[in-house]
Image (spheres, rainbow, N blue to C red):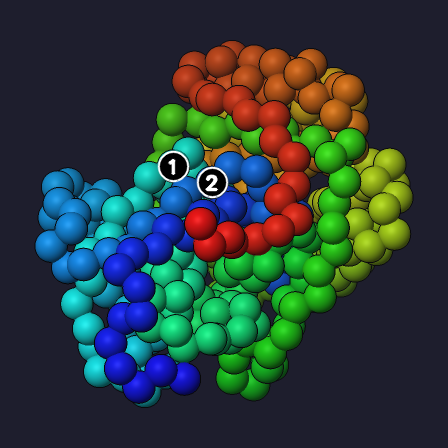
Amino acid sequence: MSAGGPKRASVSIRVPGSTSNCGAGFDTLGLAVQLYNTVTLGPADSFAAPRDERDARASQMVSSAARAFFSCVGLPLAPFGYHIEGGVPAARGLGSSVTVIAGILAGLNELHGTALERSELVRLASAEEGHPDNASAGILGGFCVSRCDPQTGRYLDTLRFEVPPSVALVVVSPEVELLTKESRGVLPRTLGYFDAVRSINSAAYVVAAFASHHYDRLKHAAGDFMHEPYRLPKIRGAAEAIAAGVGAGAYTGWLSGSGSSVLCVADSARAPVISAAMAGAFAAAGVPATGRVLAADNHGLRVQ
């Protein structure tokens, strides 16, 4: 590892957005999507200061990620400037916070020549996020199944599978922001035994379908009883949008992360019809929404 200052003047890191939970895989399953933010790092005076509340939230994430990085590599805190741009909407359940955190961690890793492996970046990002689902997908790409220590919650490992472009990820995002911290507040402190059993069954089958590339077997497979019953009712039109997507031919659908976006998995040929049906459900509920037909990102973050 480096023992000195920055080894290059600036660097840009492109990080994909992601959908997490994927139904019942709460805090465990993540899937990277072809929607990106780019984080550029340079000299401390190279970019403008944060301007609004959203910039301020990003600034807090940047500061925390930087402290984690310098502590990990054993270097003193060093000043830097940053700029974030791209198409991953904030507070929509598409991993925008990970694009910032991972971009800062990977950018500092490049600037200081510290050669941290991607697995270490996932560990650091997971600690910042509090869970590894989006962190693993955003950094590693593909469909990710992450494992944590059952006693401490510390990130341990990820197994990932590539997803072909023939599989469309139809995302519809209502014009409603939901911060993960706030969304977790609606979850129950305990869960019924049989709700847990049904969720385990669903999560295991979804993983098997992605691992075996039998995407048609996903039909109605992503049922969840752990978080969606508590979160979906808070987002007007969301449950109806998922149902409309499945009714229009999607394999399955879920609440993306903690919301507010919903996502359906489909054959790419059916994607436009499915996207229209999902957006129509939000429109019927009086909620403006933006639809995106995406594919999986199988590369994860990239140094540009």
In the displayed orientation, state which residue is furthest to the front.
Answer: 8
- Relative to 149, say whether 266 is above or below: above
Quadrant in the rendering for residue 11: bottom left
- Relative to 23, say whether 234 is above or below: above
Q: SS for tag 1?
A: strand
Query: Residue 145 at x, y = what percent?
Result: 68, 62
In terms of sequence position, does the residue under pointer 2 or pointer 1 come before the other?
A: 2
Q: Is residue 49 left or right of residue 208?
A: left
Q: Residue at x 31, y 86 (%)?
A: 3
Quadrant in the rendering for residue 107: bottom left
Q: What residue sits right under mark 1 in the picture?
A: 86
Q: Residue at x 13, y 45 (%)?
A: 48
Tag 2 and tag 1, C-beta contact below 8 Å: yes
The tag on residue 36 is: 2
- Which residue occupies the foreground of this view, 106 or 130? 106
Q: SS for tag 2?
A: strand
Q: Residue at x 27, y 71 (%)?
A: 6
- Relative to 71, say whether 118 is above or below: above
Query: Residue 257 at x, y = what percent?
Result: 52, 48
Q: Residue at x 29, y 56 (%)?
A: 10
Is residue 182 visible in the rendered image? The answer is no
Q: Residues within 10 Å of mark 2 (few under 14, many from 20)?
A: many
Q: Disc 2 marks which amino acid?
A: Tyr
Is residue 275 visible in the rendered image? The answer is yes
Query: Residue 64 at x, y = what percent?
Result: 27, 68
- Which residue occupies the foreground of this view, 12 or 291? 12
Query: Residue 195 at x, y = what percent?
Result: 69, 58
Q: Disc 1 marks which amino acid?
A: Gly
